[in-house]
Amino acid sequence: MPQLKVLITGVAGFIGSNLADRLVKLSGCKVIGIDNLAYGVREQVPEGVEFHKLDIRSKEIYPLFEKVDYVFHLAAKNCISDCQADPVETADINVTGTVNVFEAARKAGVKKVIYAESSAIYEDSSVIPTPESEIKPVSFYAASKAATMYFANSFEHFSDLRFTALRYFCVYGPRQDYRRTIPPVMSAFIIKLLKGEQPFIYGSGDKKRDFVYVDDVNDFHLLCMNEGITDGRVFNLGSGKNYSVNEIYTMIAGLLDSGLTPVHKSDLPGEAQQTLADITNASRIGWRPKTEITAGLKNMVSFIKSEFQKGNIK
Ligand SMILES: NC(=O)c1ccc[n+]([C@@H]2O[C@H](COP(=O)([O-])OP(=O)(O)OC[C@H]3O[C@@H](n4cnc5c(N)ncnc54)[C@H](O)[C@@H]3O)[C@@H](O)[C@H]2O)c1
C-alpha cells in the first residue's frame, strides 16, 4: 500500500519528468501525472506514473486530487516569446489554470501545493544577488507568475491549504526543452555542435545567468514534502553563481572538442543583463546546490547524444 500520494502537473515537461523519476524511486510513493502535452513529451513520463492527458484548466482534473498528499504544480506556458505573442492564453493557462489546480487541491483536502513561480518575477530589479522581496515583473509571463503568488496567498488565508512557492532560476539538465522556437542556450549549443553547425548567440554573449542543476532542484522538492519549515514561504532556487553565455559556450565546445565558432545575432529584447539568486533562505533550511557546472553539462551532453542515437533529435 502506498503511504504517500503525489500529483505532478506538467509531468511530461523538463522539471516535472525529472521530479517524477525521483519520486517513483521512493518506496511507498504513488505518483499521478497531468499534462496536456502542449510542450511536454509523453515518452518522458517515467514508468510507474499514472498519467492523465488533461488540461489544467479542465474540471476533469478534480477527481485525480482525491486522497493526494502533495501537489507539485509545474504546468505552464513558459516560453517568454510565446507568452509575449499571446497574453490572453498566457493568463488563461498560467493564472486561470493555476487557480483551477489550487481549487481542486483545496476541495480534495490536499496537504500542500508546491508550485513554480520564476526568477522572471525579478525582471526589473537591479539588486544582485536578488532576494525574494524584489518583485518587479515586466513581461506577460512574469506578470502571470506574480498573479499566482497573490492567489496562493488568498487560498492560504481562506483555507487550510498550505503552499510553498519556488522561484527557479535557469534550471538545466537532461530533458531540458529543446523544441522551442528559441531553445534554452545549453541545449541549443549542444545540439548545434553535435550536428556540426555553428550555434547562435543573441547579442554579445556577455549576459550572465544563474544556472542550477535539475537534481539539486529535486533535492529541494523533497525538502518541501518533509519540512514544515517551508510552508507558507517562497524560495529562490539558483546556484548562487552565474556564468556568461560566452563562458557556457566555451565550456560546451570544450566538452565536445569542437572548434566551431558561434554566429552572433541581434539581441533579444527585454532580457536582463544578469541573473543571480540570493539563496540565503534556501540555504538556511539546509539546502545546498551540489552540482558543479561542468559535471552538469557533461550529463546533459551524454543525454543529448543518446537522444540523437535513438533518433529523437534529427
Ligand atoms: N526550466 C526553467 O529554467 C524554469 C525557470 C523558471 C520557472 N520555471 C517554471 O517551472 C515550471 C516547469 O518548467 P519546465 O522547464 O519543466 O517547463 P516545460 O515546458 O518543460 O514543462 C511544462 C509542462 O506543462 C505542460 N502544460 C502546458 N500547458 C498546460 C496545460 N494547459 N495543461 C496541462 N499541461 C500543460 C507542458 O506540456 C509541459 O510538459 C513551469 O511552471 C515554469 O514556468 C522553469
Image: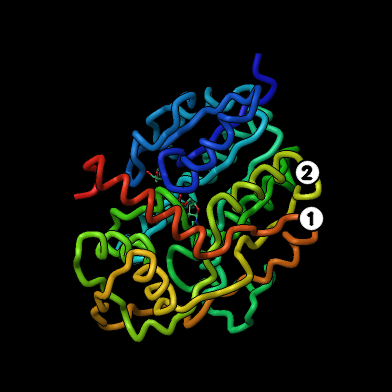
Disc 2 and disc 1: Cα gap in Å? 9 Å
Q: Judge whether 178 appears above or below 128 on screen.
A: above
In the depicted view, which residue is nearer to us: 104 or 185? Answer: 185
Q: Position of residue 82 (x, y in %)?
A: 32, 61
**Residue that lies at the very extreme toward the top in this rendered image:** 1
Q: Residue at x 26, y 75 (%)?
A: 259
Q: Judge whether 5 appears above or below 212 on screen.
A: above
Q: Position of residue 96 (x, y in %)?
A: 48, 47
Q: Residue at x 75, y 61 (%)?
A: 283
Q: Quadrant of the N terminus?
A: top right
Badge 2 crowding class, 10 Å Cα cut-off, few under 14, some 14 to 19, many 20 or more, is: few
Q: Is 263 positioned to the left or the right of 75 in the image? A: left
Secondary structure type for disc 2: loop
In the depicted view, which residue is nearer to us: 270 or 62? Answer: 270
Q: Residue at x 67, y 25 (%)?
A: 4
Q: Amino acid at mark 2?
A: Glu
Contact between marks 2 and 1 (CB within 8 A): the answer is yes
Q: Which quarter of the picture shows residue 212?
A: bottom right
Q: Is mark 1 within 8 Å of ligand 1?
A: no
Q: How is the image coloured?
A: rainbow
Badge 1 crowding class, 10 Å Cα cut-off, few under 14, some 14 to 19, many 20 or more, is: few
What residue would you read off at disc 1? 285
Q: Residue at x 30, y 45 (%)?
A: 307
Q: Is 305 positioned to the left or the right of 235 in the image? A: left
Q: Earlier in the sequence, mark 2 or mark 1?
A: 2
What residue would you read off at disc 2? 227
Q: Amino acid at mark 1?
A: Ile
**Residue that lies at the very extreme toward the front in this rendered image:** 257
Secondary structure type for disc 1: loop
Q: Position of residue 176 (x, y in %)?
A: 40, 53
Q: Position of residue 106 (x, y in %)?
A: 65, 34
